[in-house]
Amino acid sequence: MRRRSKDRALFQALGYLYLGCLSLLCLLPIWLIFSGSLSSEDDVIRHGYEMIPRNVSFAGYRMMFEAPEAILRSLAVSVALTVVGVACGAFLTAMTAYVIQRPDFKYRNVISFYIYLTSVFTGGLVPWYIMMVNYFHMRNNFLALIVPLLFNVFYILIMKSFFRSIPDAIVESGKIDGAGEFAIFLKLVLPIAKPGLATISLFIALAYWNDWFSAMLFINKDSLIPLQLFLYNLVNKAEALNNLAGQTGIPMTELPKETVKLSMTVLVITPIMFIYPFVQRYVVSGVTLGAVKG
Amino acid sequence: MRGSPLMKEWTKNKVLFLMVLPAIVYYFLFSYLPLAGMVLAFKNYRFDSGIFGSPWAGFNNFEFFFKSGKAWLVTSNTVLYNAAFIVSGLILQILVAIVVAEIAGRYVKKLMQTTLLFPFFLSWVVVGSFVYNLFNYDVGSINGILRALGIEPVDFYGNPNYWSYILLFFNNWKYIGYNSLIYLAVIVGIDKSLFEAAEIDGASIFQRIRAITLPLMIPTVMILLLLSIGNIFRGNFDLFYQIVGNNGLLFDATDVIDTYVFRSLIHSQDIGMSAAAGLYQSVLCFAIIMTSNFIVKRIQPDYSLF
């Protein structure tokens, strides 16, 4: 008995050590960003970014507020993108998944195959890009940001397995009451599927909010650049930094060039940090739903 | 036509057909048309003639791709990086799941789990900022520490050797919390009476994990392993592009098929050759997915993709 409790204590100690180290490693880059964004530019130039700011300075943040137009415009693009994307994406995904799981729909397997095949065999980036630009005229088009993430086979699968768990009797009862197929889906089935809908909405929202690839491929007009690409340009391209600086009217020599990059990163992380505690559980349910693929 | 099965189904389930129509049109436009556009790989693309009007080039694009010496480099990089991600991820994530399932202290455990999952929510652009913040030569945190200790700073961006470790770190950093949830779900699903029986028989916690938890996880682990092997020729573009960027000094060590295709398309505008490289990748992907799916189907039909 004594050996067992000693083993248990050893396991607890090792377990906490392991998880504790991993958690610290997860937090470290985020901590460094916050600390760096609050450092003074002089300290950063002289000593590099540090764990704890030597002199706390809000110069990086102030610079963003001096010229908020471009940042607010990108923020508006990202918000619009996420809202439109989730509304359309979640609804269309649910509707598609509902139809291809209906046992009395004869062509459900043919259509499922038609959809799944696209995840197994793709044309690759190049033909897709040429089609999008030269045939669908997606360059500098808001739709170019919506279309690429609108449907996802994995989310269709999650919704499909969710709908499968709803008894057929509900659909039958709707039919007996004389409701049309679309009304049955909208008024009877969809409300029951709310937890599943919440999960895929979260995944879709994350995908749109965090997307930068479509914008990098198709957008070069300032008014359509989402927040992520704005941040990318600011960190990686000197001209983006100079543009922002030009709008603030701060003399070049006094610009907090380094800290503004991190302040902008903090601005992009912050909304996620606020919603994270409320939505975390939907990710967990998504994993369990995805695991029992139908 | 009136009597055909399709027409009968159409009159019977008209609304259902209409409901699935957006998806059919979407996949036709954005997946099947580009699939037809793969003929680009065999063409000498001209902007004025379009995909289907451009003159044929036979296998010239492929020849160019394979003779450039890049084909083998980017393929082996893709496979080796993915293999390293799969193996390291598997070990770290299973350990997290086992520890979370077994240790006491509900709130501390919850807090740590929450921390580990957080990176899953951040974009790769933000990860790019982290990398800049850590590894920049002049202002990076790591070189700041080295300078403070009186050690010569390291030029990370000029030396390809460090980057495989950096990529490995951030790939695990991003996905450890999320993927360990899958394994945790398996452990939670194990019949509790097995653990109780082991307890009564006097098994220690380590024996219990080795004799019950791990063996019962094997089916799920096998399936996930095979599924990730199915994607072994697909590089994670976001990861590689945000961390390495367009730094030519690092390409030999960090270029994967996806970044190579992207650069050939956007920067060198070499449409035919990048389409050929893309088609080469698609064929490899398809072959390995079919193989791994075939094996999954043999072991556990419920988990096969199709």
Image: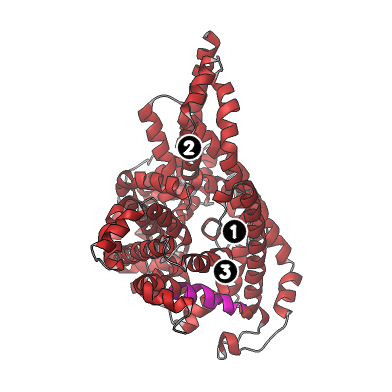
Using the rendered view, name the quadrant where residue A223 is placed: bottom left
In the rendered image, which residue does mark 3 sit on? A122
Q: Are marks 3 and 1 in contact (CB under 8 Å)?
A: no
The front one of B50 and B39 is B39
Left or right relative to A178: residue B213: right
Predominant SS of the magenta segment: helix
Kindly identify the amino acid type of the residue bearing the numbered disc 2.
Leu
Q: CA distance from mark 3 to mark 2?
A: 32 Å
Q: CA separation, marks 3 and 1?
A: 14 Å
Specify whether A251 is left or right of B155. Answer: left
Query: Which residue is the site of mark 2?
Result: B184
Q: From the viewer's perspective, is the residue at label 2 or at label 1 nearer?
A: 2
Based on the picture, tell me whether residue B228 belongs to the magenta stretch. no
Q: Residue furthest top?
A: A2
Q: Could you confirm whether marks 3 and 2 are on the same chain?
A: no
Q: Residue at x 60, y 59 (%)?
A: B234
Q: Where is residue A150 drawn, in percent x and y?
A: 40, 66
Q: Secondary structure at mark 3?
A: loop
Amino acid type assigned to the residue bearing label 1 in the image: Gly
Q: Chain of mark 2?
A: B
Same chain letter for marks 3 and 1: no
Q: Provide residue B26's location: percent of width, then percent of height.
A: 44, 73
Residue A43, percent from left and from top: 40, 46
Q: Which residues lie in the magenta part?
A: B25-38
Direction from residue A97 to residue B148 in the image, left or right? right
- The lab-note entry on whether marks 2 and 1 share a chain reads yes
The residue identified by callout 1 is: B235
Q: Residues within 10 Å of mark 1 (few under 14, many from 20)?
A: many
Is mark 2 in CB contact (under 8 Å) with mark 1? no
